[in-house]
Every structure is written in C-alpha cells, then in structure tokens.
Image (cartoon, rainbow, N blue to C red):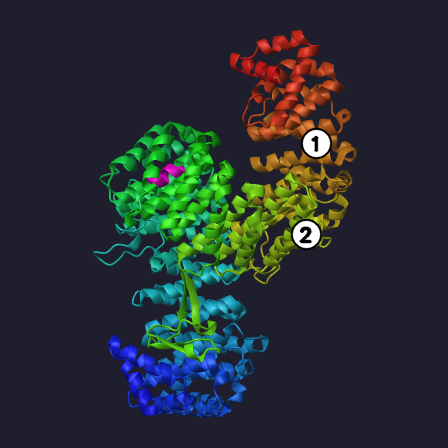
Amino acid sequence: MTEELEQILSQLTQPDNAIIQQATAQLKQAFKDPAIIPGLCAVMSGSQNPQIRQSAAVMLRLRVKKHWKKISPNDRESLKAVVLQAFMQETEHTVQHSLSQLCAVMVKHETPDRWPALLQLLNQSTKSSNPHDRQVGLLLLNKVIESNPEPFKPHYCQLLQLLRSVLEDHNNPTALYYCILTLTAITAFIGTEEMHLMRSILPNLIVALKCLIKADQNQASEAMEVFNELMESEVSVIVPHVADVVRFFLEVGSDTNLSDSLRVKALSCVTFLIKLKSKTVLKQKLLSPILQAIFPVLTAAPPPGEQDPEDEEDDSGDGTDNESPKHCAAQIIDTMALHMPPEKLFQQLMPLTQTCLASENPYQKKGGLMCLAVLAEGCADHIRTKILKSVLQTVCQSLSDSSEVVRSAGLFALGQFSEHLQPEVSTYCSELMPLLLGYLSSLNQAKVGHVTKAFYALENFMENLGADIEPYLPTLMETMLSALNNTDNLKIKELAVSAIGAIANAAKELLVPYFTPVIESLKGFLTTTTEEMRSLQTQSLDTLSVLARTIGKDVFSPLAAECVQLGLNLTNTIDDPDLRRCTYSLYSAVSIVTPDCLTPHLTAITTVMLYALKSSEGVTAHLEEDKAFVLLDDDDDENEEKDTEIFLEDDKGTDIHDVAGFSVENAYIDEKEDACEALGEIAFNAGVAFQPFLESSFQQVYEMRDFPHEDVRRAAFGAMGQFCRAQHKVWKENPTEANQQALLKLLDIVVPCFLETVRREPERHVVMGVLESMNSVIKSCKEEVFKNPSRLKEISHAIRDVLKKKTPCQDSGGDEADDEDQQAEYDAMLQEFAGEGIPLVAASVPADNFFPFLNDLLPFIMNKAKSSCTVADRSFSVGTIAEILHALMSVSGGRGVAGRLSNRLLPVLVAGAKDSDPEVRNNSVFGLGCLAQAAGPIVVSDYPMMLSVFSNLLSKESDLRVIDNLCAALCRMIMSNVDAVPLEQVLPALVARLPLKEDQEENNTVFSCMAMLYTHSPALVVNLMKPIVAASSHVLGNKDVDKESQNISVALMQKFAQNHSAEFQAAVTSLPAEQRDSLSAAITAS
C-alpha cells in the first residue's frame, strides 16, 4: 500500500486538475482500508520527496483529529513511535513543522503522561548540546504546548526553568523564537507558584528579544506578543520591571532602522500598558521619558518625495491609518489623556507641544496640532475650563498656514475640538464659521483629500450649533445642494450629503424650506444599484435617518412608509454590511416618528437584524496551517461512504486550538453594534406591536454580552435595558398579570447580568454603558426592579464598588493612599454614572429600606465636594446630593430620612452655594431648596441662615440659571414652611426676578408657590399682580414650558380675572401687544 499511497500523493501535487480529481477518487477508496494508518506512517518516514512526507503528516493529523477512537490501539502505539522517530530523522523544516502539529493533535487525545516517550524526547532535545537539535526540540515543544496549554500545567515550573536557560542561548535566534512563543502560550494559565519564576525571567526575555530583533524582525515582531499576553493576563509580572520594559519598548519604537511593523508593535505595547497601569507609569516617573521618546516619532518628516499616509490625496479622511509609528505615537498621547489626571499630563506635555507649535518646520507644527487634537476627548473639561481660548487661537492660525500639511492637521484638530469641547467651542462661532465657509467656496478647485478634512471640521462644528446656525443656513444649503446637483465627483457628493445630516442636527425644523430638494436627491441616490454608488448610498441612508429624527413629525411622516420600503429594497438586492447597518438606524428613526409604518415589516426587519447578530461573516480565524492541500474528513461516523473529501485549501473543520486568534472586519462589528441599538430602540418605540419579536430578539442580543469586541458588548447591554423598558411600557398600557410576570422575568435576567458585568468587565467604556443602561431601567421600572428582595443590596454594593474604585475596569494602582483628588476625567465620569444611580434608587424604594445603604454611599459623594476637587467633581457631588433630596420628597418615609441627613448635608450645600463656579452654585441652590421641601419642619431652625445665604447671592449673582434656581429654592422654602419666611421682604425680591430665563422646568415650582400664596396671603399677591401677570405671559404658549406649569399659571390668572378684574385688566393692558394676545388666548382656550 505504501507505494500506491506515495503515487497518489505525488499526483495530488501536480498542477493538472484532471490528475488531481483522479487521485482524489483513489485516495477516498484508500481511506476505507484500515491499513491506511500504517501506510501513511511508512510514507511519512520513508518517502524521498519532502512534499510527500509533509502531505502524509497532514493527512494523518486530520485522521487523528477526527477519528482517534477508530484507530486500533496497536496502530496508535506504533503511530506514537513512528512520528517521534520520523521527527528526529527529518531534515526539512516544513515537514518538521507538520510533524510537530501531528504530535500536538495526538497529545490532545493522549495526555502528556500517557506518552512518556514524547516527554523524554522533549527533555533530551531541548537540552541537547547540538544547537540544531535544540531548535527542533523547541519547535516540537512549542506546537505541542500551544495546542494543549492546560494538560502541561503540572510541568510548568520545570518548563519555565528550561525556557529561562534557553533565553540565554543568544546565538540561536530560532530557538529564542520558539521559546518565547511557548512562554506566550502558557502565560494565561500560570498560577501563583509560577509567578515569581515568571518575574525572574523578564530581564532575560528583554535581552533575548534584542538578539532576535537583530536576527529576524518578523519573528521578533511576532514574539513581542508575549508582552500583550502578560499585560492582559498577569500584568503583576511586569510591574516590578516596568521601567526596563518601557525603556525597551521606546528603544524599539524610536529606532528608524527597524521595520514599521516592529516599531508599531513596540509602541502599541506602551499604549496598552498605559491603559492598564497608568498609575504605575506615573509613580515610576515614566511619563517624561515616554513623551521625550515619542515626540520625535510624532514630528518626524516622511522620506524626501513622500507624504504621511493621512496627507496623501486618496486618504479616506477618517484618520484610521493604524499601521504607522507616527499614528501609534499619537495614540499613546490619546491613551494618556483618557487614563491620566490632566494636571499631571499637561505639566509635562505642554512645553513639548508649545515648542512644536512655535517651530517653522511644518511637520513639527503638524505634530503639535495632532497632539492638541488627541487630547480633546480625554481632557475635555481641563481644556474647556483652563486653556480653550489659547488653543483655539493656535488652531485658527494654522488654518491659514502656507503648508497644506499644517492646514490639514489644523482642520483635524478643529474637528476633534468641535466634537469634544462643547458647548464652549460653539461660542466661537462668529470667528470659526467664516474660516470654514472660506474652505467651501473653493470646493471645485481644491484636492478632494483636503476638502474631506475641511468637511470633517465643518460637520463636527455645525452639528452642535443649534439655532445659532440660522444666519449661515442659506449659504450652507446653497453650497450643498449645488454640490449634489452639479458635481460629477461622487466623493464630493457624499461629503455634501453627510454635511446636510450635520446641518439638520443643528437646524432641526429650520431646514424645512430645503427639505423637498434634499429628499429628491437622496431618493435618486438610493434607487440606483451600481457598485460605485455604494458609499454615497450608505451616507444617504444615514442622512435620511437624521432628517427623520430632526425635521419634525408632520414633515417626515408622509414619507416614512416609503423610506422603510427603500431600506428593505436595498438590503434585498445588495449584500453589504455598511448599507444594512444604515437601514437599521433608518428603521429606528422611523420608529420614533411613526412606529405604525414599521409594524407590517417587523418580521422582515427583525429577521435581517437577528441574522446579522448570529452571522460569523467577516470573522476570520487565523489558522496555524501549512498551505498544503488538506484532507477534510467528515464527522459522519454512521456513513463511512462520506468519510472523506479532499480540498485544495485550508481545513474548514477548524478546532479552536488550531486558531491563533480571530479578526473581525470592522464593517461587520459596526453592523452588530447598530443591530443591537436599533432592536432596542424599535422595541421601545413600537410597543405592543413588537411583543411577538421580543423574546427572540432578547435571546440573540443576550448572546452578544460576551462578544470579543467591546463596542458590541456595550450596545448589547444598552439594548437589554431598552427591552426591559419596552416590556414595562407594554405592562403600563395594558396592566395584565401576564405582562407584569414577563417584565419581572426579564428583569431577573437583565439586572443580575448588569451587576455581574460591573464586577467582571475589564473595559471601562463597557461598564459606563452598563451603568447608564441600568440607570435607565431603574428610572423607568422603579419598584419593579426591587421586587426581588436581594436586589437593593446588590445594586447599592455595585454602586459602592465603583465609587471605591474596586472594579476590574478601574486601575486601583494597588495603593490606597494615592492622590484621591486627581484622576483621569473618564475615571471620574465612570464614577458619575454610578453616582447617578443613587437618586434613582432613592426614588424607587421606601426611604427607610434604602437608608442604611444611602448612609454607606454618601461619604463617597460628599468627598468630591472638597474645594481641592475639580469643578466637574464638585458639581457632580452637590448635584447628586440635590437629586437624592428631590427623590426623597416623593417616597414613603422620605421626610424622616431627609431630616436625619440634614445636619450632614446642609454645610456641604451652603459651601457649594458660595462656589466660584456657576454650575456648582446652581446645583447647591437647587439642593438647598429640595432639602427645605424634603425635610420639612425639622430644618425650620436653619431658615434664617439659608435666607441670608440666598439674600447675599441674589444681590450679586449674574448667572441667569443660578438666579432662576434661587427663585425656585425660595418658593420651595415657602411651600414647605410658609410661616418661617418673612414674605413681605422675600416675595417682592423674588417676583422682581421673574420670568425665569433659563431653567423653564422650575416654572412649575414658582407658579405652584404663587397659587398657594394667593390662598394663604391674597393681599400680598394682589399687590404684586403686575409682575406676576407679566411673568405668566412669558410662560403661556411657550414651547419650552411643560403643559402642567402652563395650566397652573392659567388657573391663577383666571382667579385674578374673576376676583380682581380691575387690577388684572390694568396689569394686562401694560403688557406688550404680543404677550397680551398670548395671555388672553390661553385664558380663553382653557
């Protein structure tokens, strides 16, 4: 049989399809003969042709993998002997590689201890004095352990000692390579007893990598993965050596003689370390050395005659060039901004940045601008409150620089600022809009790449302008519509469509006059099917969704059904994840405006979205595989006929252990993320109509909670919260026992899942999403969330853990005594999401049940009110206290609990009312009013002191929102204890500050108070009728004031008209005509 097999295998390597097919048929036949195993063994060890030896090893491997149990015990034993013998005598590296993979699969079935000859061979060869034997032994060791890391656990200590000695074999780079790959494979499985060994190996590892870099940069780049693995699973191994490790990364990352891919690998390790251990990096004083090393990388000029990838004409303009050292240098600064306290970072970073910006060299300037741009997200508060004016000035100057490289970087920075530094950036509208419009006027002459960057800046800037965009609308829309109708360049059309979406976000119904021509253009783009129109169509769908959400129900509703049909037609004819993803957000938008339009199509829509969540399309497994032909034998044990098939390609029946990792194309990740978000939103908006799809949608979204990509996990948790809110809404509209049980069942799955994620999830941004989603569920479902008796304790403890920085996504730095007041802005934001849950819980359960937990949580909140804390922290602290007091007004036992807390909270709020920041003052004043209202009589003794604080404030306060809240707080004090307030002095001062200018929500409080006072001291109110009527005329018919407040105001006016008609008429007559009309219209209407 051996000769026959050799013949068949050699035919399979011929470049002739007919011969291959014939050989395939013969091989299928041969596989039915039990002698196939010894036959292949003989070929594998005896053939003269290395390619055939390799094929035999691959065939055996697949046979063993699927059908080990069918191989007779004798054949198994002889195979174990033959494979080791073949391995020892083999001279060709490719065949050794395949033989080592065959061993790896056999170890899976035979534990290492049942194959002593293998352990013996590994032991001898890896310690051999012959360098080649050591290499081959390490290759075998590596393959066997990579596939079976766990069964070798008992041997880890011995193994680590062996690997440590191999790492000193500096003249044998191949041995070093396999040694480091083996270390990488076991890192995730090492236990405490191996830790100290692993730590002691680290210095040798760095030296070994330096040797490997000299010998083979590609292998070195792959071996660097060991650091990612260590940081991910056992970062404590690195911490004692962190300075040496960082120095090594920086040396490699800065060395321009090395390949880009190796430098990128080293620099991304720095990014990852900062993300995980920013506190250690700061404590070890590594911030300055890192910045000193990466600035030259960030500001390097490209080789003569070349450009940086993002400055090339065909760049997509979205800044996604991941593979350059320059990009990684910027990413390091971006990560610092997200994970370090701004004060500490800016102190070291700004001098370097300013030097760059002052330089005449365009690439130095570009580096400085890139640096400012990537700081905007993580250090937004710091930039907005401390240095906004000067950095904006710098960016504006760069927009008129003579170098296009500098102008492009300036546009990118402006786009980042516009996205992250709101609302302050928008106040520079009159300086910035003319500059940006200037770019648009030369639309047709400029290079498309540069125009793309101008649009990026313009869109981000316009999106947040709100009604301030009005003066620019005619120019903007004229430019955009002209681009849609006149240019042949599809990229420019796409940019214009995208810009119209941004304009719509700001302009809302102001865009109505332009709606028809825009819709006609979009429909035209969406009904063609040519391939080159694809990205324009994707953008058109996106903009259509924005219009649906912003233009107003009356204008969009007539088109809703047609839009849904457009979306369905596109996904039926075109298979493109980006296009599908945009149809999902279109359906979401339609569900807000006219959910009924979706109802007939819900089956089709949910089917597509659930398929997108289930699908593994776009997921590529990286196979450790010889690119030889591979036998894929069926798993069908019953039917031996179908037992074999041959493919000239990779093995499709991949076992997870053959996989070196997965990569998912971004478009498919985005599609999964958008599908989760859309399902949640549609479920909530469609209500009862979505009920038949709720369970299947929930199950599929729930499966996504462990998806490898964090954005998909975050979206899944968001959707799970939406499903709970949707079920709650259905139950409220139709309060049956079955609907309530369905809600409780859902909450019993979702809430524990949220809590578990907070306890386990390593990604901060996912935990923020979970807390936000949990807050929205508590806010909507209130006491239903707490029907399970253990829930109150679990939720309170989860909030406490985040406030104490005790969760895995918070780098505690292992040192309790660190500088509490300084932390990264995003770390503070995570704690804010947790803190926001406290008043929501307080509003959902009886106050006495919550009191012990509240008592436990309050110190963490009050701590952030200290004057040494940031403005954001102080504002959060007093704001949360105020919301807790507000919540206590509406629950049973709330008054008693508010009274018990009043002594602790009063000093914090009074100090806050005197703060230098208006937002802190505002929240504190609101809190004092809520304290008076929630605690009732018990705080009457504090009224004189509170009134004196308010009186001082009223005399000098210039912030309109604070003044509004002062009026409301006085009203709360009056309503709570009218006899404790000297009305003759307080009321005229209060009424003089009406109408409210900013905080329209408080009209409810103010007019409820006036109505109460009219019953209590009518004479006093009638004396002030004129200003009260004037204030009322501003409230009635005002779209920013809720209906309830307007009704309270109307009722009071009617009483005035009935009981004091002369004074009332006089007051009305003194009003301007417009207000007079709205007042009489409102009174008549009611």
Judge left or right: residue 907 versus residue 484. Answer: right
The correct choice, above or below, for 756 with respect to 412 in the image is below
Secondary structure, mark 2, is helix
Q: Which mark is residue 946?
A: 1
Q: Which residues are the magenta region?
A: 495-502
Which element is circle 1 on?
helix
Amino acid at dot 2: Ser
Quadrant of image for the N terminus: bottom left
Q: Quadrant of the C terminus?
A: top right
Considering only order in the chain, which callout, 1 or 2, is on the residue closer to the N terminus?
2
Identity of the residue drawn at 23% across and 38% down:
444
* Residue at the spot of label 2: 796
Task: Please tell me how crowded label 2 is: few (under 14), some (14-19), or many (20+) other residues with Cα within 10 Å.
Answer: some
Is any atom of residue 168 visible in this view?
Answer: no
Looking at numbered disc 1 in the image, what kind of residue is underneath it? Met
Q: Nearer the viewer, mark 2 or mark 1?
A: 2
Q: Is residue 500 part of the magenta span, yes or no? A: yes
Counting from the top left corner in percent of width and height, residue 1068 is at 59, 11
Q: Position of residue 197 (x, y in %)?
A: 53, 78
The residue located at (66%, 41%) in the rendering is 881
**Residue 75, image x, y percentages:** 46, 91
